[in-house]
Each structure stands twice: as C-alpha cells, then as structure tokens.
Amino acid sequence: SLRLIRFAFPVMLFHVSAAILINGDIFFVKSILTDDLETGFYAAAQSISRIIYFVSVGFNVVLLPAFASFKLKHDAELTKRYLYRVLRLFVLMLGPIVVMFDSSADTIVRMFYGEAFYPATYPLRILVWGMAFWATSGALGAILQGGDRQSAPTFIYLALLPLNIVMQVVFIHAFQLIGAATATSMTFLVGMVLLAVRLFSEQKAVMKKLSFVRISCSLIVLHLVCNRVIYGVRGSIVL
C-alpha cells in the first residue's frame, strides 16, 4: 500500500497543478478586468476550447498502464516503437481538430452562444492551441509516469504555477482577454517542451524528421484550405 501511495501521490499533484493552471486564468480575468461582460466572453471561449482536451482523454487513460507494462518487461526497443507510433497518431488526430477550430472560431462561437458573444472569438483562437499543448503535456506526463518517472511531470507543473501567475498579471493588464489566453497557452507550451525534452532524453527516441515535416505541411495546407472555404462560404452568403 505504501508503494501505491508513493506512485499515486505525484500523479495526483500533477493533475491538481494542471487543474489550477487551466482554471486560474478566468479568476485573473475577473479580478483584474473587473468586468462581468468580458469575463463572460472569456468563460465562453474557455468552455469551447476544452473540447480539444477531452478529445484526447482516452489516450491519456491508456498510456500510463501501457508504458508501465513496458517498463516491467524491460523492453526498450518496443517502448521506443510504441512511443513513436503513439505520438504520431496523437498529432495526426489532434492537429486537424485544432486547425479547424482555429479557422472557424467565430462560427463556432456564434453556434454555441450567438452573435452577442463574437468577442470570445479572439481568445478562443489562442486557447485552442493552449488546450492542444495541455493535451500533449498530459500524454507526455502519462508516458513518463508509466515509465516510473512520476515526480518529473509533477515538478515541472509545480514550477509552471508561479510562471503562469506572473504572465497572467502582466499579459492581462497589457492585452486583456487575448493576454489571458496567451499566458495560459504559453504556460502549457513551456510545460509540453520541458516534458518532451525529459522524455526524449530518457528514451532516446524522437519522431522522424520526415514524418514531422509531412504532418506540419499537411496542417498548414489544411489551415489555408479551411480559411479559404469558410471565407468563400461567407462571401457567397453576403452576395
């Protein structure tokens, strides 16, 4: 039971830290801007953007026990192959969804909340990327935790808490809602990079450069196509 507690406690702290980071921005918006209307716009953007994370929840649930079993088998080569395939599939699944949410943010806001909430479009376009970074961080953290490195993701996320507080205060004063969304997204980007560096330095495995370039180019093309289609449809409606 003591071993179970030692395993579970850092994992619990990791998720508590993530919950504070993901929910803290709305409290900073409300306390700094002191405007219920602006807070409502941000809360709308925040709620929609979290769809990105929930799409990936199934991955995170599976990854921890899967990599824990590989650790018990001491099969380093199988772990590297599985890591590459999982991350590739993760990016292929999440990337197009994020691009489409970014491209059609104003349409999505209108669909859920109506024309009055159009100002939520701008923070939503930033937050969808932050949620993608959060989802990826969760996957990387689950892999590390499954590989008997429970403390590493926890320490990284605890270190992100003061960083996020500073960025929220500075960015919200400077850029209002866009500043809050930027601070949240940048915090999760830093966490994702630190977790990726830790994981890849241990596993000595990275996504192949050619595969990474192909996926990146595909997402760029998809973004351009989505924008062209959406604005083309709007133009035809106006005419």
Image (spheres, helix red, strand yellow):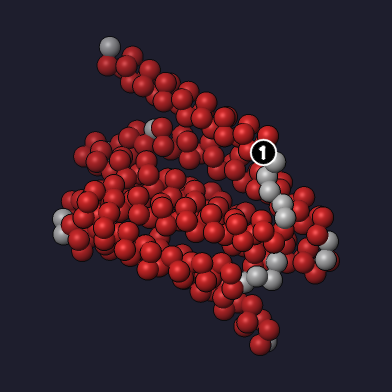
Judge from the rendering whether residue 190 lies leftward or rightward of residue 203; answer left or right: left
* Residue type at the position of mark 1: Lys
Q: Element at badge 1?
A: helix
Look at the picture and state if 47 lies above or below 20. above
Where residue 102 appears, x then y in whole percent?
41, 37
Residue assigned mark 1: 209
Where, by quadrant of the figure, is residue 159 drawn?
Answer: bottom left
Judge from the rendering whether residue 70 lies leftward or rightward of residue 231; answer left or right: right
Where residue 42 appears, x then y in whole percent?
28, 51
| Residue displayed at 25% across by 38% down | 118
Assign the N terminus to one quadrant of the image.
bottom right
Crowd class of label 1 (few under 14; some 14 to 19; many from 20; radius 10 Å)? few
| Residue displayed at 66% across by 87% down | 2
| Residue displayed at 59% across by 55% down | 196
| Residue displayed at 35% across by 50% down | 182
Look at the picture and state if 124 lies above or below 62. above
